[in-house]
Image (cartoon, rainbow, N blue to C red):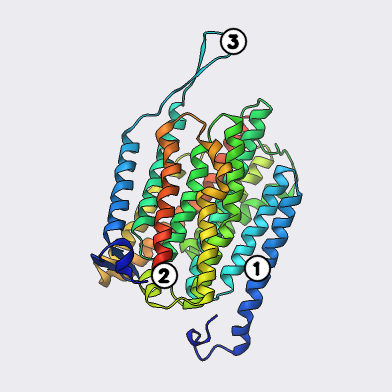
Amino acid sequence: MVASLVPQFVPAFYQSMYATALYGGLIVAFIGLIGIAMEKRDIQVLILTDIVGLAMLIVVAAVGTDLSEALILPGLVVELAEIMAISEILISREMRKADKDTSFTPMPLDINMEIMTTAPNFIALLLIGYGVFLSGFTGGAVAGGGIVIYVLSRKARGLPIVVLDGVGAISGISWCLWIIGFLLFFLLPQYWLLSLFLAALGLLLKVASKIGLIGILMREEYGRK
Amino acid sequence: MLLENVGGNLLGTIPLGDIVLYLNPLHIFLFVTILVFTALIAMSRTETQVEAMFGSLDENKVAVGKKEFKHRRFLAIICGIATAGAMITGDLFNFTLFMALIGIVNIGIVSAVKQVEVLNSAYQYGLIAMMCGLPLFGGAAMILAATGTLSLLELAAIPASPMMIFGALVMLIGVCGESGIAPFFASKAEMFRTPGSPFILIIHLSSLFIIVRFIEILLTIL
């Protein structure tokens, strides 16, 4: 890293870390590539490829500015999306080789434990309440986690799940709230508090319902067996 | 090298806060061409492959179902828009993101086909694209570390240092791998052997355009 670009208050020790981190990342990637070259099974190759993706994160993170952080986020998302897409292709290929339908059913659980009758309700309520209190993206993730726990534990006990088919519509409408909130920020800055709450609550509903949708998808997958 | 020498005269800039788009004849030509092609794709219908069967006079038609057709058309339009964005951007950061998006969408377009060989080559291409995420993002990060900026207008003014040249070359490897051109082409060529012609063609066209644009970027910043 060029010394003249780095602000004065950054200690010399941290500046000298850049080369170390860069070489570290490249070595990690090299180890991953050796593993890919030696491995023959497809699923193992896919898992080992993720090591190269992690090495990419190390190389980008070594720069350590806000712009590099902005590069890390899409990099991570791209890695995740690609690994999901490729594993989907792998599943589809293997199913087609075996001449089966491509719908992939995970383990059909049917566990009846006493703790699963009371605890999930309480935990779900707690998580949803805390999520609403947090609001925004984090709150949406927490509340959505609560919904998923509730749905999964009910399903694991073999009980019918409350129909959540309208959740998709809530997700779409709250997405509009979020966009309206953002527009108000630019058009009428004096109503910043209103637009802040619109955006925060819209995002809360959006993310929570999106994660809740995982529960619906899972129910459909289970129902198909 | 000066900006004016590569893509023609600088026609103007569009400053959107930190993001500054700069326009010259090459960019505008590439941008309009890819948008026209995307519009054609959005309107067109998919082809049906007819294969002659061996040892008889029958033929085997490989058609694309309606659901798969819609899925493919959507992804092809996204791919066209991402390519158009990469053509007009004045920022190495946005270029990297558009490139990564094109890589994913290319896998997505062929992910729903039924032929096992096509799925196999899509899998191989996906692995290469994932591994080339390292040189792509890593190269951009090295250029950032060497110069402190990713804006092409500013990079053009900074004289090239060895680290910047190294970063740019690493990024070239990344772009080659993500778009699946020459050294990595063997994995991608099989992907075209599936029905659904106009949507499959955007995979090819996007990689061609991306390479032209990236060579222009390299000549500009080095």
Task: Respond whether the residues carrying marks 3 and 1 are from the same subunit.
Answer: no
Nearer to us in this view, B16 or B136: B136
* Residue type marked 2: Ile
Residue under label 2: B221
Residue at x 50%, y 56% (from the top left corner): B175
Q: Is residue A32 left or right of residue A189?
A: right
Q: Residue A65: horizontal and vertical position, in percent?
A: 51, 76
* Residue type marked 1: Gly
Evaluate if marks 2 and 3 touch, with contact meaning CB atoms under 8 Å apart: no
Residue under label 3: B55
Q: CA distance from mark 2 to mark 1?
A: 25 Å
Residue at x 43%, y 64% (from the top left corner): B218
Q: Residue B92: horizontal and vertical position, in percent?
A: 43, 65
* Residue type marked 3: Gly
Callout 3: helix, strand or loop? loop
Task: Report the mark closest to the observer, 2 or 1.
Answer: 2
Disc nearer the start of the sequence (2/3) = 3
- Disc 1: which chain? A
Residue at x 52%, y 91% (from the top left corner): A9
Evaluate if marks 2 and 1 touch, with contact meaning CB atoms under 8 Å apart: no
Q: CA distance from mark 3 to mark 1?
A: 56 Å
